[in-house]
Image: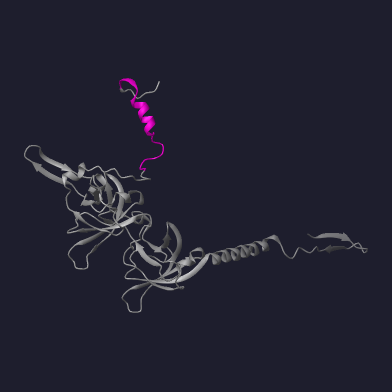
C-alpha cells in the first residue's frame, strides 16, 4: 500500500511497500502437487505383479472394470484385453494387488465366473447384476513365479478337506450335478463333488464327499440311490402316490443312502458302490445304532431335550409354564 510524506522541500514523495514474494494463492498448486505425489506413491505400493491369462473368449470381461476375486475379496483387476497372436483366443492382462502377489506362481488356476443354471441350482447369481469376474485358486505356493497362465473353461473341482470321498456307479444320470446334496434320513450328510464317465464308458462315476461326522455311517453293505425328482407309483388299492426326498432334492437332485441293522465293516475312503435308480422299501425300515458326533443341524437356541420333557409334562398338553 502506498503512502506519502512531505520532504524538506515540502514536496510529497511516494513510499512503496514491497509485497511478499510468495502469497497464499501460490501455495494451492504446490499443496495439490504434494497430495498427488503422495496418492501416486500409495497406489504404486498397492500394485502387485502383472500376469497374463489366456481364455477362449472374453465375453463379459471389460478392461478397468472386471475384477479378480479369491474367497470373496478383490485381489486384482483387468488392465487390458487383446487377441492372442494365433487369433484363437484372448489374452487378459491382470494387475494383482501386492498382498496377492503369491498368486503369481505355477499351479494357480484362473477361470471366468458367469451365472449358470444346472442340476445343482443357480450358481453365481450375483454376476447377473455385477457382471462376470475372474475366479482364482492358488496352488501349493511351492512352484516358481509365473507371468503367463492358461485359464480354465469352467470352475475347477476344489475338494473339501473336511470329509471322506466315496465313488458311486450309476447306469444313467438324469437330475444330478455338482454340489447336489447327499442325505441320510433326510439330513444332508454330504454333497456330490463331480461326475465323470468311466474309462470304459459303461457307467457314470459319481464322486461324493461325506462329512466327517457322518462317515461312520458308511459301511461295506451301505446302499445308495437316486433321491432326485418325484417318485410316482400306482397301486390298485391305494391309487396314485407321489413322493420326493424334499423340496431341495426335487429341484437340484440328490443322493440318499441307508445302512442295514447289521452294519458291515467300515468302508475305506474311496470305496465304490452301486447307485440304484429307486430305493427298495425295506431300506426305509433299517435303523442301525451307530455312534456319530457333531451332527447338530439346528441353532444352539433350540431348547434341549430336558426342556422338551418339562414342556410335555404340563397337564392337558398345555405348553405354557406357570
Between 234 and 86, the one nearer to me in the picture: 234
* Residue at the extreme bottom of the image, as rendered: 86
- Residue 310 higher or lower than 262, as above or below: above
Q: Residue shown at 35%/72% (left/top)?
A: 90
Q: Is 131 colored magenta in this rendering?
A: no
Which segment did they paint magenta? 296-316
Residue at image position (38%, 54%) is 162
Residue 230 percent across, percent down from the top left:
18, 47
Relative placement, left or right, of 108 versus 192 is right
Viewer-proximal residue among 107 and 292: 292
In which quadrant will I find the N terminus? bottom right
Direction from residue 315 to residue 9 in the image, left or right: right
Please give the name of the residue rendered at 16% of the width and 50% of the height, measured from the top-left corner: 278
Tell me the quadrant of the picture where the C terminus can be found.
top left
Residue at the far left in the pictured view: 236
Q: How is the rendered protein coloured?
A: one colour
- Against 305, residue 271 (above or below) is below
Q: Position of residue 93 (x, y in %)?
A: 42, 70
Q: Residue furthest right?
A: 8
Residue 37 or 119: which is nearer the viewer?
A: 119
The x and y percentages for residue 267 are 28, 55
Amino acid at each position: 500500500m502506498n503512502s506519502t510524506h512531505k520532504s524538506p522541500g515540502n514536496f510529497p514523495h511516494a513510499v512503496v511497500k514491497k509485497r511478499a514474494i510468495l502469497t497464499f494463492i501460490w501455495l494451492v498448486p504446490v499443496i495439490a502437487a504434494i497430495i498427488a505425489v503422495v496418492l501416486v506413491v500409495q497406489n504404486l505400493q498397492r500394485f502387485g505383479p502383472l500376469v497374463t491369462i489366456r481364455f477362449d473368449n472374453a465375453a463379459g470381461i471389460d478392461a478397468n472394470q472386471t475384477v479378480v476375486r479369491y474367497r470373496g475379496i478383490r485381489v486384482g483387476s483387468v488392465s487390458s484385453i487383446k487377441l492372442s497372436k494365433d487369433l484363437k483366443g484372448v489374452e487378459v492382462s491382470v494387475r494383482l494387488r501386492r498382498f496377492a502377489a503369491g498368486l503369481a506362481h505355477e499351479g494357480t488356476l484362473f477361470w471366468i465366473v458367469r451365472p449358470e443354471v444346472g442340476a445343482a441350482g443357480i450358481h453365481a447369481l450375483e454376476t447377473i447384476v455385477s457382471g462376470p469376474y475372474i475366479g482364482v485358486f492358488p496352488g501349493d505356493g511351492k512352484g516358481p513365479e509365473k507371468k503367463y497362465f492358461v485359464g480354465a473353461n469352467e470352475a475347477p473341482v476344489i475338494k473339501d478337506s473336511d470329509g471322506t470321498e466315496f465313488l458311486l456307479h450309476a447306469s444313467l444320470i438324469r437330475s444330478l450335478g455338482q454340489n447336489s446334496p447327499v442325505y441320510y434320513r433326510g439330513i444332508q450328510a454330504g454333497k456330490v463333488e463331480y461326475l465323470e464317465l468311466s474309462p470304459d464308458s459303461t457307467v457314470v462315476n459319481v464322486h461324493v464327499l461325506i462329512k466327517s461326522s457322518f462317515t461312520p455311517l458308511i459301511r461295506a453293505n451301505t446302499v445308495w440311490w437316486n433321491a432326485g425328482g418325484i417318485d410316482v407309483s400306482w397301486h390298485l388299492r391305494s391309487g396314485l402316490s407321489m413322493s420326493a426326498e424334499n423340496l431341495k432334492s426335487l429341484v437340484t437332485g440328490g443322493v440318499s443312502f441307508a445302512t442295514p441293522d447289521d452294519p458291515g465293516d467300515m468302508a475305506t475312503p474311496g470305496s465304490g458302490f452301486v447307485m440304484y435308480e429307486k430305493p427298495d422299501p425295506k431300506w426305509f425300515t433299517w435303523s442301525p445304532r451307530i455312534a456319530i458326533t457333531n451332527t447338530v443341524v439346528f441353532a444352539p437356541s433350540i431348547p434341549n431335550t430336558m426342556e422338551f420333557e418339562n414342556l410335555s409334562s404340563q397337564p392337558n398338553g398345555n405348553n405354557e409354564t406357570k
